[in-house]
Amino acid sequence: MPNPLQTRVTDLLGSRYPILQTGMGWVATPGLVAAACNAGAFGFLAAATLPPDEVAAEIRKIQRETDRPFGVNFLMDAPGADVIADAIIREGVRAAGYNRAPDANLIARLKENGVVCVPTCGAVKHAVKAEKLGADIIIVQGGEGGGHTGSVPTSLLTPAAADAVGVPVVAAGGFRDGRGLVAALAFGAEGIAMGTRFLMTRESPVPDATIQRYLDAAVTDVIVSTTLDGMPQRMITNELMTELEHSGPVRRLWMALRNALALRRETGATIPDLLRSALAMRRHEKLSNAQMILAANAPILARIAMSDGDPARGYLPSGTVAGLIEDRPTCQALVDRIIGEATETLKRLCP
């Protein structure tokens, strides 16, 4: 009898288990990625918040800590995307993750060099388009997922996407345990992707003060707001969000401009680079000019919480599942527990 925990996803990615650690900015660092992979999952390095010419060095850090395959997640419409793609190919990275504004030429180049292409989509129509552009695996994120999110629950989006495409689907949004993995398989997915659950592990680089906000959060504290950049984002409510909710458009615009300059310093992008990226984002995401300018807020405000350790003034992207998580295990303990629970659940359902 085939092992239901060995799927096309594990075959394509070379991971022991169909569990993916997502490429969270400022969180999915080499240490976390290597720990997730060594535990049997498949980790993605977050390259969107790195200077493109430093990505190769970060890839090599992971390679020094694990001999397991891993991926790199980046934004195809951001400055330096071609540099990151070159690094992925040159360093022999197994998979590339991406979401908004997929670039057909970049995807073709990655595939020609044997890189597994793994986009993240929040709607069935986007999954269908992603498959046509060459996706090998598609992560479908339901409304329970953290950060930018849609309104369709994971339990509805996953089977609909699995029916609509021929490539394997990975379910994201609301997963933390083995029962969830089995449920995702029943929905037609061939794996799960988790961000918040891996953010709350021992190997996560997130400072203790910020982690405590996640541990203290109730389900009702994890909200969806458009205040940050004009698009729906799921996050833990905090002092920053309360202030922004009561701020006028002028103050938000000033914050966005200030953060855009900070993002330029972080990534090394030039002002023309940022303008081209913003215009591409507006075109692909159908953003207004105001939303385009506000889009600079999220990466820098996330850094304040996730890297600087200030959960009051920073942005706390989070899946709803944070309200149910009460511990901070190692990646190994987490993956072992998930697989153990999934195995027991399958035995109970199919004695």
Image (cartoon, grey):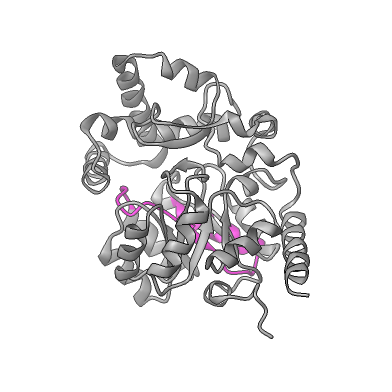
Asked whether, in this view, residue 184 is left or right of residue 92, the answer is right
Instruction: Check residue 82 for magenta coloring.
Output: no
Asked if 22 appears above or below 113 in the picture, the reply is above
First to last magenta residue range? 54-80
Asked whether, in this view, residue 185 is left or right of residue 47, the answer is right
Asked whether, in this view, residue 140 is left or right of residue 324, the answer is left
Asked whether, in this view, residue 35 is left or right of residue 120, the answer is right
Pick the quarter of the image with the N terminus: bottom right
Question: What is the residue that sits farthest to the bottom in this orientation?
Answer: 1
Instruction: Give whichever of 261, 212 is nearer the camera.
Output: 212
Asked if 7 appears above or below 126 in the picture, the reply is below
Residue at figure coordinates x 49%, y 34% from the top left: 302
Asked if 184 appears above or below 46 in the picture, the reply is below
Instruction: Check residue 70 for magenta coloring.
Output: yes
Q: Position of residue 298 (x, y in %)?
A: 42, 34
Question: Quadrant of the rendered structure where residue 61 is?
Answer: bottom right
Q: Position of residue 87 (x, y in %)?
A: 42, 62
Instruction: Give whichever of 299, 155 is nearer the camera.
Output: 155
Q: Position of residue 31 (x, y in %)?
A: 64, 52
Residue at figure coordinates x 54%, y 26% from the top left: 237
Residue at figure coordinates x 47%, y 29% from the top left: 301
Let me know if residue 317 appears in the view. Answer: yes
